[in-house]
Image (cartoon, rainbow, N blue to C red):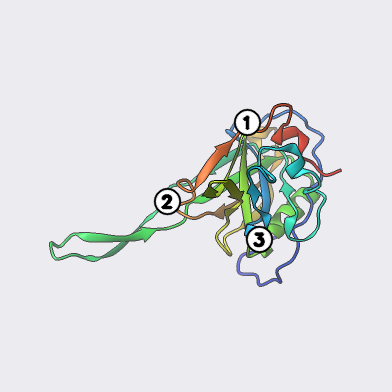
Amino acid sequence: MSLAGCICPEGDLNTVSNNECKEYRGAGKVAKLFFQKSLTSNAFVNATNGIELANSWAGLADATGDTKVVITPFLNSVEFGEAEVVDGVENFEGATTKSGVRPPVVTCTIVDPKPEHVKAINSIGCSNTAGVYFVWSSDKITGNEIAESPATYIPIKISEGTFIGTPPQKASEFGSQFVYTFQFQIGADWYENSNIVEPETGFSYLSDIAVS
């Protein structure tokens, strides 16, 4: 399914079913992605519904509407591309000025995905407000910290129209299993506006958040 250039109505994000594999086998440091609409109404706020608390995530994977959280299977790899500098005009000394930075591309792969995983993840491209949390193999989470006091988090906004999934291809390095690749772009300032949070004791982002 290709979403390049498609025009589709803004709708709910689709559920990705649980993966039977309970063990992280990926080579990258990002183990999973959590997708949710990047809206202030979805904010996790410290001392109210802190992002580190199990209760704050309860029911979100099964929710419908804007609050829904879509959880990917364990990822084999996640690569953060270089941000490309955009040249501007020459200054009075004849040097080329820099007018900005293009959003970096995030490329992810899943080995041997289920067809429904591919379909659900591809559909994220039809949301103009989708955002992403990075969940690390160390069981920490990275989100967009929009306020420091109290600490408030929403998903890192995915640049509109940049999410695309490619048809799974067989890869010899994985025993000829199918490998699914998808990518998207995030703002060039995503890192400076992000923060990493540890879950409360006894709670795991990787294993405790799932569809019922």
Q: Is residue 197 above or below residue 124?
A: above
Inter-mark Cα distance, 2 to 3:
21 Å
- The residue that mark 3 highlights is 125
Inter-mark Cα distance, 1 to 2:
24 Å
* Left or right: 45 as drawn, with respect to 102: right
Quarter assignment of residue 179: top right
Q: In the rendered view of the protein, which quadrant contains the N terminus?
A: bottom right
Q: Residue at x 74, y 66 (%)?
A: 11
SS assignment at label 1: loop
- Image location of residue 82, percent across then percent down: 43, 47
Q: Is residue 39 visible?
A: no
* Left or right: 146 as drawn, with respect to 76: left
Q: Residue furthest right?
A: 212
- Image location of residue 89, percent across then percent down: 25, 67
The amino acid pointed to by label 1 is: Ser
Residue 83, numbered label: 2
**Disc 2 and disc 3 in contact, CB within 8 angstroms:** no
Front-lying residue, 49 or 100: 49
Residue 137, numbered label: 1
Q: Earlier in the sequence, mark 2 or mark 3?
A: 2
SS assignment at label 2: loop
Q: Residues within 10 Å of mark 2 (few under 14, many from 20)?
A: some
